[in-house]
Image (cartoon, rainbow, N blue to C red):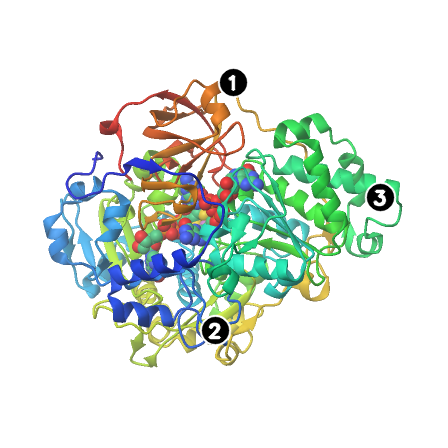
Amino acid sequence: MTGRAPGPDPVQDSPRITPPRHHAVGVHAVTNAMRMAQRQMGVVRGARALLRVNQPDGFDCPGCAWPEEDKIHKAEFCENGAKAVAEEATRRRVTPEFFARHAVADLLGRSGYWLGQQGRLTRPMLLEEGATHYAPVGWERAFEIIGEEFAALGSPDEAVFYTSGRTPNEPAFALQLFARRLGTNNLPDCANMCHESTGSALVETLGVGKGSVSLEDIHHADLVIVAGQNPGTNHPRMMAALEQTKDNGGRIISVNPLPEAGLERFKNPQRPRGVVGSGTKLADLFLQIRAGGDLALFRALNLLLLEAEDAAPGTVLDRAFIEEHTLGFEAWEKDARTTAWDDVLTATGLPRERIERAARMVLESKSVIVCWALGLTQHKHSVPTLREVVDFLLLRGNVGRPGAGVCPVRGHSNVQGDRTMGIFERMPEAFHAALDEEFRFTSPRRHGYDSVNAIKAMRDGKVGIFVGMGGNFVAAAPDTPVTEDAVRRCALTVQISTKLNRSHLVTGTRALILPTLGRSDEDRTAAGPQFVTVEDSMGLVHASRGRLKGEPELRSETSIVCAMARAALGPGDDVPWEEFGVDLDRLRERIARVVPGFEDFNARVREPGGFALPHAPRDTRTFPTHTGKANFTVNDMVVPHIPEGRLLLQTLRSHDQYNTTVYGLDDRYRGVHDGRRVVLVSPADIEGLGLAEGAYTDLVSEWPDGRVRRAAHFKVVAYPTARGCAAAYMPEATVLVPLDHTSDISNTPAYKSVVIRFEPDSGPDAVVVI
Ligand SMILES: Nc1nc2c(c(=O)[nH]1)N[C@H]1C(S)=C(S)[C@@H](COP(=O)(O)OP(=O)(O)OC[C@H]3O[C@@H](n4cnc5c(=O)[nH]c(N)nc54)[C@H](O)[C@@H]3O)O[C@H]1N2
Ligand SMILES: Nc1nc2c(c(=O)[nH]1)N[C@H]1C(S)=C(S)[C@@H](COP(=O)(O)OP(=O)(O)OC[C@H]3O[C@@H](n4cnc5c(=O)[nH]c(N)nc54)[C@H](O)[C@@H]3O)O[C@H]1N2
Ligand SMILES: [Mo]
């Protein structure tokens, strides 16, 4: 079923390598974006689409969850936001004729890049049992099939509803209501594979699983620590915020195994010094840490703060804050003092002097923010690492005051909103109670499956129906062949999507593709023009209105979810699904009564710029944890073990991709061109392991279950990464991540720490296309 892509699929395994860049987002980047936009959309449509991005009456950029700098007055989009828009607003079309030409088996041999390049999905398609090709199906027949398959389930828990974080609030709320009316909490989402560790750590320690800072805080912080994040590619608008921090005299520390260009220097195209000058230097200190070394680093910083307090009592710790607002300090302190430098130096790979320098910078800063993304969330010990980050901030009262706090930088543009709307396999009791009261039923309290457990349940034959609300589950989830075999055991798979991807090709016995409107598309229903709402990484909720004319057959995500709910729950279900499907105000009225912070939703979201959700630690320095205080936690030291002759591989994004969507074959800032099958290794490790720069190798991961996980034919690139570490792109390297290798507590796949060894190249014919 798999193999090398024939014909026009571009060859991805002949990358050309140039030296890495030391700055990000110059004029060059913007020109690139315009080129990409024009290729996909044409000049006029392209310009019209881009002018609407992140405008008060426009649509929310589908690129990332970083908030808009000044939503009311100026257009703000970045190179990668433009690519995301171009990918969606493309004029290319996947038609029924396309599916007639290409058997599913043929499409399975194509890369995700090629599939995405074919354009927008246009018609509902059905893959019947035993059929080789998808065939067009009417919407009504599609919903009938869904009704039949739901009726055939033995129990509601045999259905799984996966959500990707681009889904706006309204369809997300409708989807969770559907699942819970059916009687299940099987609502896994992409956050399970992304920032779940953040949620686990912050709910326990601060009481709210979201970031506590605003853009203002970033601008005015004395020190911003950016750990495990590559904003130059993944959150480009964040660099403008960091530039402001620098303008205001703040400093930045970057913690990363890779010297990411976007953290070195920023050339802001909207400023003269960005256009003709050398831009703004961002990181004042770069800690080139070993992957998985962050827990040790924060333990060391905390020890140094305690020692500074010993040397000058009363000057370092915020005793009043600790006394009034926290619990557990004494037990924490006792343990913190046992931190051994040998462990710290091995785990971090950093010289002690650099950690001491970082500690001095912390001591010189009244207000400190820690920003992080996947480099901190996708390890086995991610939750303790993030709890230790909170300990670090609590020590000096760096939560709940200006310029200070936690800043998890979320990924998908509405991943945070989806969770707020109830997309979670274990929502708190208060949410269930409010939902029950509003819709007069008893929602199930038994926890559902998260993403990894959903795969295990499918593997074990416990799931009949898998619904994908956006996303590309089989390529995003770990252990690709294991996940694919699991999904194939379902009776029905349903994908609600904008673009063709691998999850449409790895199917249950029957499969449906339901094509939907995207962010940039206009949604006009019997009730008039509709808009949706989203929540950014800082808890700001605002409206998003698409303006481009979509294909006539497309339906909005909300209307699809509501029609599915009606089909599955039957005419007797007294939720007004038909009304919700056409008039989003009616749905928002209900959200306003169920979800805290959304009171008067319809009116407030129509204000320019939207509104901010409450956040107790930020707003009132209160901490709604199980103890009612902010909690210090004791987190045992972890020194990642890398066996002799092995490296710790992280799987990450190139500059030309959006998760599993590949836009192009370049990773410009890292100097990788025209190909993606590269493994970045430090020159010292290349020599130590007897590898040859530029040669090809297989990557084999090591896991005690005895299964051989091999990613064939990767080019060895000498790269200034930390020693002992390697990096390769997702989703090509995802096959190496074992399903059981997950973070403790949050169960997030440990995509950033896979022990690998190198074996002789099996050659290009062994490449399994993904
Ligand atoms: N253009 C574009 N934008 C995106 C996305 C995209 O694919 N393309 N994806 C979106 C999504 S869903 C998300 S979640 C975010 C992802 O945003 P990021 O988290 O920036 O994504 P990654 O590419 O996985 O990069 C992880 C970074 O962490 C570093 N790192 C890895 N391991 C460690 C470690 O152990 N310690 C430390 N300190 N650093 C480490 C890596 O070197 C890298 O710089 O971006 C969002 N925005
Ligand atoms: N190896 C490895 N794997 C990873 C990660 C990693 O770092 N390493 N990161 C993980 C992370 S952080 C995440 S968030 C997941 C991402 O997992 P997903 O969110 O499941 O994957 P995406 O690639 O973002 O999904 C792309 C698809 O979404 C659909 N889509 C796009 N826009 C819309 C829309 O508006 N509506 C609907 N209904 N569909 C739309 C299109 O069909 C497109 O093909 O991947 C995870 N996987
Ligand atoms: Mo993500």
Given the image, on which type of amino acid does mark 2 rest?
Lys
Q: Classify 10 Å Cα crowding around label 3: few (below 14), some (14-19), many (20 and above).
A: some
Q: CA distance from mark 2 to mark 1?
A: 54 Å
Query: 486 and 35: which one is in front?
Result: 35
Indicate which label's residue lies in the foreground, 2 or 1: 2
In the displayed structure, 590 sits above or below 625; it is below
Q: Indicate the position of residue 395 as horizontal and vertical percent values.
A: 76, 48
Q: Secondary structure at mark 2?
A: loop
Q: Position of residue 320 (x, y in %)?
A: 84, 56
Vertical position of residue 686 compared to residue 238: above or below: above
Quarter of the C terminus within the rendering: top left
Q: Which residue is mark 2?
A: 74
Residue at which label 3 appears:
309
Residue 463 quadrant: top left
Q: Is residue 644 left or right of residue 79?
A: right
Q: In the rendered image, which residue does mark 1 sit on?
A: 644
Looking at numbered disc 1 in the image, what kind of residue is underneath it? Glu
Task: Please name the residue shown 24% across and 55% down the image.
Answer: 513
* Residue 182 located left or right of residue 71: left
Sequence-earlier tag: 3 or 2: 2
Q: Is residue 268 visible?
A: no
Secondary structure under badge 3?
A: helix
Query: Looking at numbered disc 3 in the image, what kind of residue is underneath it?
Result: Glu
Precedes in sequence: disc 2 or disc 1: 2
Q: From the viewer's side, name the closer residue of 752 and 208.
A: 752
